[in-house]
Structure formats: structure tokens, C-alpha cells
Image (spheres, grey):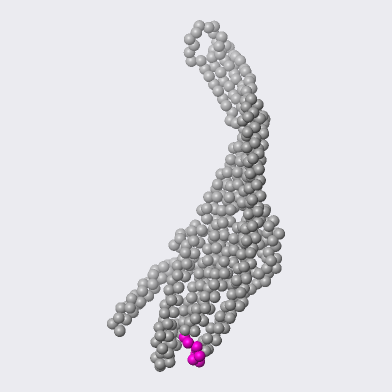
Amino acid sequence: MFRFMKPILFFLCSASFITASRADTLNAGEPAPEVLSLSTVTESVLADNPLIRAAHAKWEAMKERVPQAAAWEDLKITGSTRVARFVDVSRNSFMDQALGLEQTIPVSGQNRSRERMAAAEAWVALEEARRTELDVLAKARGAYYGLAKEQALLELNRVDEAALKDFLLGSRAKFGVGGQTQAEVLTAENEVARIGEREHDLVLAESEAETQLNVLMNRDPFSRLGPADDMPVQAEHADFPVAQLRGALLANRPEIGMALADVARAKAEQELAGREWIPDPALTVQAQRYNYAGQAISELDVGVSMNLPWLNGKKYRAGEREAASDVEMAERALDGARIEGTGLLRDQLEKIDTLTHHVELYEKQLIPNARRALDATRISYESGGATFEDMIVAQRTLWELEATAREHFADYEMALADLEAVIGSDSGILKPATETTHSKTK
């Protein structure tokens, strides 16, 4: 049997040596990462995230369209000179040089309507930037809580593994004196191996959460992040000020802001359609000179030109009807955005309330009961009343309950972050009116 065990032991030792060597290589010359806080993540995301910076750059670009839309038409200059004349006329019968200036005067105010349209489009870009910022922040906070959850589960898994290894040593000792069967020893060894396998999955999940955070913070995905702040598992079980939250949502939700901006744009477009009936005259000043005249300017002409929209009434009346329908559509879309946002608020508050109940149930009842059951099973096992299988089942049940509690707590924190994204505000209004803290009992 030793002949088969020897290569296995060699493989395990080699793997341990390689793992230790890799850890030394990773840690050599590299300082240990500091504890990662949520505020650090938030500041880094706001400062460096490419999506947020791109959205803000788009908004800055859209703002520059406003003065362009409000500006007058460019001044036009025209000039001409005689090159050749193929008829025999007296010297001053025709002009030989001419210089003219033409300027359109926006007496209709159409440029002001276009300015309001451009301002509304810039407003939309601002709300889109806010939505991008809120979504990226919610995603970053979710990744942060996910990282904290995986790190907590890893710690729970290691505690569970250490406890089972102690049980395994006791089982081997009992087996050596005939107090326990080989099947129980093998069961314990399989359980330890299963916990080791579970740790690999948790390490993978931790790595994925770390990568996601690095990407959102615009850091090298291979760079190390420190451990997340040790947050106690707790939930604020209280009634949120729903009326106040609804008011904040109507005032701050980006989708509602976009809809309001679209209504403003449609009304400015409707105003423009009405002003297109008013022609903008073009004033022309032209100086003429004859070659054989003694003056620098022989003639000075002033003229006015304009289009006549009244002769094409069918076109402009259709434009007015189109603009009116566009206003109605934008107003209906605004109503829909308000209703949709209110519905999302209700669902999110219900989700938070449900997750609060879950966290409270696990931390106040299920986990303490599972710990007492494990202690009772351990005492019974030591006195010979319970089997080792009973010990494993009790230990596994406790770990699963603690892991589920961590899952619910992470979901609770993510739901709070999503609530801020739904409302469009991270102000203190999200704090419950009455707070009852359920702290972790572990």
C-alpha cells in the first residue's frame, strides 16, 4: 500500500511547495494591500471610471451646442470685378467693381427656439450622465459587497475545515483503538476534501468580484485589492418615509429628468414651428465703383430680401401639427416615466423589507439554533450517543445557514444601493425614519 501512497504524498508535497513559492513570488517586494472601504471604492469609481468620464464628456460637448444654436447667421460678403467686356459702351455705363455685405436678422426669434431645443438636448445628456453614474456606482457597490461576502464565506469555510480536521483526528484516534469504524473515518476525510473543494469555488468567486471592482475603478485587473471592511451582519428594520421617497424620486430620477427635458424640447420645437411663419429678412449693403469715376465708391445700394412662407401654408401647417403631436407624445412619456419609477420604488422597498426579514430570521433564530444543535450533537457524540455522521450533518447545516445569512446580507446591501439608483439620489433621505439595529450575534 505504501507503494501507491508514496507518489500521492510526493504530489501533495510538490503542490504545497509550488503554492507557497507562488505566494512568495506574489508577495515579494509588494506591500500588503490596505483594508478596502466602500468610500474608497466610490471615490475611485467617480474619479476614474471610463463610462462615467465618457458620459460627462458627452454632456460637456452637448452644452457647447447651445450658443451655436442661439447665434445669428454668419455675415456674408460678396465681391465682383469686370474681367472683360465685349460690347462697345460708354465708359461709365456699367459698374466695374462691386462689394456687398449681407446679414440675416432673426426678427422671428427662431434662433431662440433652437437655443431652447439645444439646451433641452444638453439636459438629456446631463441626465444620461447621471444615470450612468448611478448605475456604475450601484454596480461597484454590489461588487464590493460581493467581495466582502466571498471573503466572509472563505473565513467561515476555513473555520469549518479546521473544526472538521479536529473531528477527523479524534476519529482516527478512536479508530486506532477500535472505537470507531473505518467507514466513519473515510466519511470524515471525504467531508474535509469536500470543504477544500468548496474553498476553490469561493476563491474563484472572490477573484471575479475583485476583477470586477478593479475594472470599475479603472485599475489593472491583476492588481491586488485589500480585504473589505469587516461589516457586521445587520439590517435596519423600519418603515421608510414613502411619501418623502416618492417626492425625491420625482425630483431626482434621471429617467424623469430625461422625459421633462424631452417635453421642453418638444415645446421649443412647437414654438419654432409657429415662428417659421415669420420670415427673417436679410439686409444687403452693396458698394459699386466705375473704373473711370473719380470716387472710390460710385454707388451705394441697400436692399432687403426674405422668403415668403405664406405661399407654402400646407408645409408649415403640417409642421405645426407634427410639433403638437410630438409635445403630446413627450408628455405621455413623462407620465409613463413617473409611473414606472414609482412602481420600481415600491418593488425595491418591498425587496428591502423581505431581505431585512431574512437577515433577522437567520441571525436571531436559525443560526443560534444551529449552533446549539451542533454543541448538543458534539456532546452526544463524545458520550457515544450520536454518530459521526450526525456531527457532519450538524456542522454542514450551520455552515450553510451562515453562508445563506451572508448571501441575504449582501443582497440587502445591494438592494439599498439599487434603491439609490432607482431614486436617483444618495442623500440622507434613504435613512429609515425609525431604526432598529439587529447586530450580528456571532
Please identify the dominant SS of the magenta region.
loop
Residue appearing at x 62%, y 58% in the figure: 344
Asked whether 332 or 309 is in front, the reply is 332
Q: Quadrant of residue 355?
A: bottom right
Number of marks present in the image shown: 0
Q: Is residue 66 above or below residue 338?
A: above
Residue 117 percent across, percent down from the top left = 62, 40
In screen coordinates, is 291 left or right of 321? left
Q: Is residue 133 left or right of residue 212?
A: right
On screen, residue 129 above or below 158: above
Q: Residue at x 67, y 53 (%)?
A: 251
Identify the residue at image location x=53%, y=7%: 89
Is 378 drawn above or below residue 422 in the view shown? Answer: below
The picture places residue 134, in percent across and down from the top left corner, at 58, 56
Magenta span contains residue 140: no
Residues in magenta, as a range: 381-388
Does residue 68 appear in the picture of this structure?
Answer: yes
**Quadrant the C terminus occupies:** bottom right
- Quarter placement of the N terminus: bottom left
Whether residue 113 is visible here, answered yes or no, is: no
